[in-house]
Amino acid sequence: MAVLIIANNPLARYAVLFAAAVFLLAAAQAQPTTPPPPPEMDCNGILLTYNLDRRDKIRPFVAAPDADAQPYSFRATTTVLNSGTRALRSWTLRLTFHHREILVQLDGAVLTSGADLPYNTTADNATSFSGYPQTDLLTPIATAGDLTKIQATLNLVGTLFAGPPPYVPLPSALSLADPSYTCPPAINVSTSTLSTCCVLTPEASANASAGDLDAGRASSYLPRGAGDLVITYDVLQAHETTYLAQVTLENDALLGRLDGWELSWEWLRGEFISSMRGAYPRQVGATDCVYGAQGAFYKGLDFSKVLNCDRKPAVLDLPPSRRGDEDIGGIDHCCRNGTMLPKSVDAAQSKSAFQMEVYKMPPDLNRTKLYAPANFRVSGASPLNPEYACGQPVRVTPTELPDPSGLASTTLALATWQVVCNMTAAPPSKPPSCCVTFSAFYNESVIPCRTCACGCPASPAAACSTTAPSMLLPPYALLMPFERRGREAVWWAGEKRLGVPRPMPCGDSCGVSINWHVATDYAGGWSARATLFNWEGADVAEWFLAVAMEKQAYDGFEQAFTFNATAMGNGTTMILMKGREGFQYLKRESNMSGVDYPVAGKQQSVLLFTKKRSGGGGGIDVVGGDGFPTRVLFNGHECAMPQRIPSSAHRRRLVLLMTTLIVFMSSILLVLSLL
């Protein structure tokens, strides 16, 4: 009936049409509008564009005086377009945000630092993004202008804090991280769009190809990088749904040591680990696969035999007892409980490796579709291990692997990525783990480790001062624990007429101490004795010691008699020492028969120096201080140094006395000869 009334009534029809128009207009206004494409810059290089697609006010709502603190959700699109004549490999983009942006979601790239989302961009001056999965942008010439091969798009979702519209919050800078390119300041090509054109530097342009018509990878890989720790991800075999990967860790730090390494990464394309040799995951299980997309796709796969389905697996090295295990061992450079020594100490133990079979997910079901995981992280089990910051994987020349049959030939990996990690600076609050004492043949006292050198006790006793200077010691007191050493220090102070602070100073709290003793000094050379004391409750395996000397002393180093020692060179003045075969372990603290206190594990060696290389001794003053190291590192960790060296005043007094005595005796003999 209502339909008939409307159909027969012209006014009713107009009213319905008007209402429909109003409804459609309101619906159109409610829908987010897609901004028109920005005008294209005239760019014959790498065109970078940032476009703020939309922002929406979110709670909590902020009153007018604090309008700049109002949170908004935002969506932005960043494009990297190669309009030049040189392929852009492993592109990395930098955005400088200045509205306290918090990134919640990324698509088309990953954070170069490997940080987790949500990510607060105020942590860095500029936020760096590495392309993933499209890491390389070819040239328009080599691809006939195919946008899918020359352009990458990064979609951002996050939160920012800014004033109300019409103000448009945009980044303050937009650039490439590639040093081969220079990027002028970005300009506004529209109210919501920033853009800049990056061009090759003159130096890079001189080395660039004329047209880069060869889009193949054979001549276009990035050079391999260098760092404190380098991770290589090699694909050895590839199938439609799986591939075999070998992961190699190499310790390239000069003196850095890693114990009990743990390696993790993030699968970004649904991959999972079927099996592994040479290492094992911290968590074994396939629950995430069974209840996820992997279980829905691989319906016939027995997931009870799948090793790990974590999106962020954590992998550990195997113990030495599993090295010969045919099921999970048998890989070169595996199975050392995660210990990696520097190459300068032992090149054979500076590398770790393992292999794993990886299952892929659609749309990567092709043997040529290979992607390395991202966001690698490495850490050590010991609190003394350094902390590392790792970059994102970079495609490099395929690794040359020795022929498994033993023939004099090499096999190339199908694909290779490299991850470079560098040690981060230790926080100032982290105390040393070792300290150094000084002594010399010309002074009866030992300069001890300074008070609280490795940290103060949590609740020092009333008689313990954390600021009083440490007290001189008799040499034999170095063999005693601090509780017993304090008593000897008081007695020594009485013998030598030295002051005794009240309250007494606290101990050094160091697990390892090193005594450097200047033993002799003569016309042609001099000698020193290095003694290591382990006050910890565990043996120190594969220890090494590095001492930095003044140039004159370093040049005169000859040999060590009990340790393996060598001058490191490479622009350093360090002498590297380690235990000889059978003495690689610095034993723990233990009780010895005949004494009523625990005794430290101890090793020592005499080092011989010559003065011939320093101008016959004219350029070195051993007694004046040149015979003492300026830095000492134990297992790669910086040790706390004494605040002074032994005084030679006692020796000078002895020399003066002997000289006076000789003059006196000579005078008597002269008088007697005249009688």
Image (tube, rainbow, N blue to C red):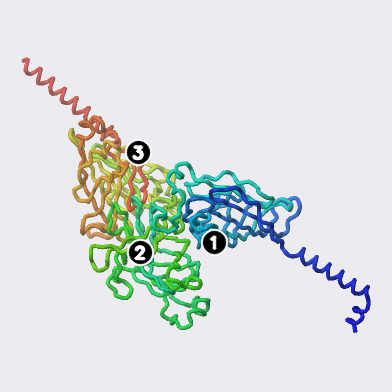
Rendering quarter of residue 622: top left
Callouts 2 and 1 close, C-beta under 8 Å: no
Q: Give above or below for 541 relative to 281.
A: above
* Foreground: disc 2 or disc 1: 1
In this picture, residue 159 sits left or right of residue 616: right
Q: Give above or below for 159 relative to 307.
A: above
Q: Which mark is residue 148?
A: 1
Q: How many marks?
A: 3
Going from N to C along the chain, the mark reached first, 2 or 3, is: 2
Q: What amino acid type is highlighted by mark number 2?
A: Ala
Rendering quarter of residue 519: top left
Q: Residue furthest top?
A: 674
Q: Which mark is residue 511?
A: none
Residue to which mark 2 is pinned:
413
Residue to which mark 3 is pinned:
644
Q: What amino acid type is highlighted by mark number 1?
A: Thr
